[in-house]
Amino acid sequence: MRRVEEAFETNFSNGLEVGAALSIFREGNQVVSLCGGFCDAARSVPWRDATLVLIWSATKGVASACVLHAMQEAGANLQTCVADFWPEFARAGKASLTLAHVLSHRAGLCALEDASANILDRGSVVRAIENQAPLLPVEAGPAYGPRVFGFVLDEILRRLADGETLGDYWRRVFAEPLGIDLWIGLPENENARVATILPPLTEKFATGEELFTRAFADADSLTRHAFMSPTGLFGISAMNSPEVRTISLPAMGGISSAHALAKFYAMLASGGTWNGQTFFKMETLGWMSTRLAQGFDPTLQREMAFSAGFMMDPIDEAGHKMRSLLGPSLSAFGHAGRGGSLGFADPEQGIGFGYVMNQMGAGVVPQERCDPLVRSFYDAA
């Protein structure tokens, strides 16, 4: 795996990273484990295997798995209407929206019009979601919800799982049985292990993201609205606060090691089983690896594809991948995080991949730093 090590080291020599870690599992065994750099801007605390760090939207994949598991246990399926178990969701024309619509970002709930909804006041956000009319019709295709999506997932899970929070459900059902260090709501006694997230060195976005750059700069755009609602916790420094780390934010607040992220996806790539324990039925795994939506996403301003809660690489009319962020396999699924983190499962080859870092890039899809890592691994396999 020398080529993988070289790609990992190149991210540092090119100035993309201050601290980072990479873990890759194949067929249940960890075959790559790399870490390097530092946990802080002063470069005084070395990055270790056990270092934890904020993974931003890579949390969405983990949170979606929790919801899919709760659906499985409750006997719900993708065609179940959300309002069947969350009656207030039916307001403002949402009665016919299904779990498939919501999980694949086709529910038109990419942003909230209620300016009073605050990310630190969960109740205000849930009420705003209940009263929000879809901003786009289902047939318009995917429209990513950077912040709102996590609150929708959390409320769905609470309704299906007798009020249990998503963060608690994650620890009970997955993290503790698997023995992995990934938290959605970090205990205070784990703070010493968490690396500091560092802001992008430049506001210049990567090639291919010019449309997103322009849209985000437009105060009236859907892109800007989606990334700014619900209000609150906009600065990088705010997300480094130990108090904020304790809050369960299923859209953007997960704290993880690379090993934990990769091991979780390795379980999904291994038929939903690990060490003799079965977590998912094959039908549920199929929801994760089947494209439910693809099209030009008006939030992210690029072609996107989504399964039930996970990103997938989009495909062209001939069935070929338009990009290979998640490797060559058509069924691979996962989720990227703002600035550079990435986790994915490749069921065809039994691979679980996890990459985490603390020096944020300016892009919304981490191709510059992750593409070489993914490509080098598959080329060497």
Image (cartoon, helix red, strand yellow):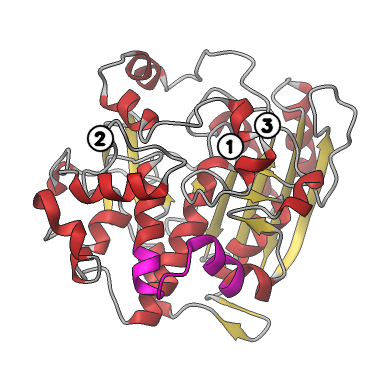
Q: Based on the displayed image, in which of its 4 quarters is residue 270 positioned?
A: bottom right
- The label nearer to you, 1 versus 3, is 3
Q: Of discs 2 and 3, which sits in the foreground?
A: 2
Q: Earlier in the sequence, mark 1 or mark 2?
A: 2
Q: Which mark is residue 371?
A: 1
Q: Which of 278/195 is in front?
A: 195
Question: Label 3 sits on what residue type?
Answer: Ile
Q: Where is residue 310? Give x, y as percent.
A: 42, 54
The crowd level at tag 2 (other Cα within 10 Å; few <14, some 14-19, many 20+) is some
Element on which disc 3 rests: loop
Residue lying at 58% horizontally and 45% vertically, measured from the top left: 342
Q: Earlier in the sequence, mark 2 or mark 3?
A: 2
Residue furthest bottom as drawn? 276
Where residue 339 sits, quadrant-wise, is top right
Q: Residue 370 in the image: x percent, y percent?
A: 61, 37
Distance CA(mark 1)–CA(mark 2):
38 Å
Is 152 left or right of 46, judged from the image as shown? left
| Earlier-in-chain disc, 1 versus 3 | 3
**Residue 366 sits in which quadrant?**
top right
Q: Which residue is mark 2?
A: 114
Which structural element holds mark 1? helix
Q: Nearer the viewer, mark 1 or mark 2?
A: 2
Rendered position, 380 above or below 174: above
Read off the magenta span: 156-173
Q: Is residue 32 left or right of residue 75?
A: right
Residue at point 18% right, 47% down?
131
Disc 1 crowd rating (10 Å Cα; few below 14, some 14-19, many 20+) is some
| Residue 36 drawn at (x, y percent) | 83, 37
